[in-house]
Amino acid sequence: MVFSLSSKLKKRAEFLLVDAGLLERSEAGKALDLSSSGQLHGDGSNRQFFRIYHMQEPVCILVAPAGKGDDDLAEARSAWFIGNHLRTRNVPVPELYGWDAETGILLFEDLGDTRLHDFIVGKKDLLLQPDADLLISYSRVIEELAQMQYACGVDFDKNWCWDSPRYDQELMLERESGYFLRAFWQGLLGRESVQGVEEELEDIAKRAAEAGADYFLHRDFQCRNIMVKDGRVRFIDFQGGRMGPLGYDLASLLIDPYAGLSQAVRENLFDYYITCIGKYTKLEENQFVHQYNLLAFQRNMQFVGAFSFLYQVKNKVFFADYISPALSDLAARLQLPQFSQYPIIRSMVKKGIALWAR
């Protein structure tokens, strides 16, 4: 694998390794040459990931920005400040060893290669019955999620955010339902926009935004962003964190197309979440269920849009397999009574399933 860091980035990385106390200067230079460093693959990210070795033992993960633009550097800055905030609140994230403001290079603790998703692969019987070991892992995730949402919303500085400081109606329309229309309906299927659908989506987003933005939101909380090391779950890819509602990250986890959890497992975990979050804040359960369904719809639209874009535009074929499950879940959610007043988007999703299946 070619180690594709520029000479400037290599020099800054060498400095960071030494400054963090991970390696001596003579060792850092050797650790960064071609024979001892391995490039890793991010899912939908354009950032570069490298595992740094010394004496054939992993030292850390080096993350370099996708480019030199302001957004690239701002994303790295967010990872550093939000990551350190999460650690001070005892959230199970990797240790952050160093950050170079000039180049955006970050050094993280190496958590290995085992994701929660790896426990799911091959367990197709989850569609029929729960797996005890997997439920234990997911239960631990639920416990840590509730604690993270509550504790990390306290003293969260919006200036750490590189994308937007809060999850709101504008974001839903642009990055979620709008993403669905642009990337899936128009881009992947090549269909014209349907009159009246934008009004429906705006109304759904308006209702979803009533959930508020009072807690910490990871916003990409799914099984491929949860590592398992030494029997403990650890969260990664938190640089998009901001303030948001409780139900969104929970929905991300439960309707995650990568996982394909059965309805029985989802309900089990949902009930457990209600118990866990109840330790930190009081919920009116019926209202929370109503908000959860609206937020799950938004997340589902984001899934379909993102998978379509990554598959068609970025040519990442891995994501094509998850478009159908995401669409099926979206169609099922739209059958709930609270979505009965939105016939246009219900019809579009149904038609989209048929067109994509061809």
Image: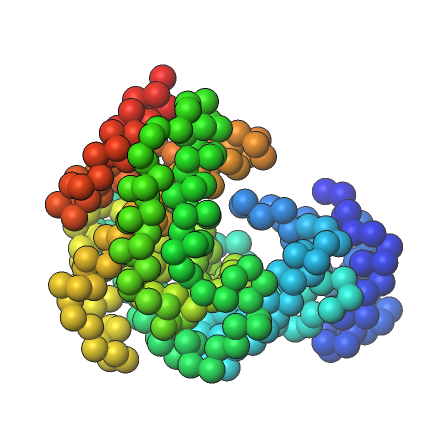
**Colouring rule applied to residues:** rainbow
Q: Residue at the spot x=43%, y=42% of the render?
A: 178
Side (left or right) of 163 relative to 202:
right
Position of residue 138 measured from the top left corner of the image (x, y, whole percent)? 31, 60
Residue 312 drawn above or below residue 168: above
Identify the residue at horizontal 21%, vertical 77% (top origin).
Answer: 282
Please tell me how many numbered marks the rendered image carries. 0
- The residue depicted at 57 percent of the width and 32 percent of the height is 313
- Say whether residue 19 is visible: yes
Q: Along the line of sight, which residue is nearer the eye, 201 or 39?
A: 201
Residue 114: x, y in percent? 48, 54
Q: What is the quadrant of the C terminus in the image? A: top left
Horizontally, residue 11 falls left or right of residue 238, namely: right
Residue 201 versus residue 227 in the image, above or below: above
Q: Position of residue 32 (x, y in %)?
A: 79, 58
Seen in the picture, residue 224 relative to 182 is either above or below; the reply is below
Q: Nearer the viewer, residue 289 or 315?
A: 289
Name the residue at 66% across, 56% down. 71
Q: Residue furthest top?
A: 358
Q: Position of residue 302 (x, y in %)?
A: 41, 45
Q: Quadrant of the N terminus?
A: top right
Residue 228 appears in the figure: no
Would you identify the image quadrant in which residue 25 lies? bottom right
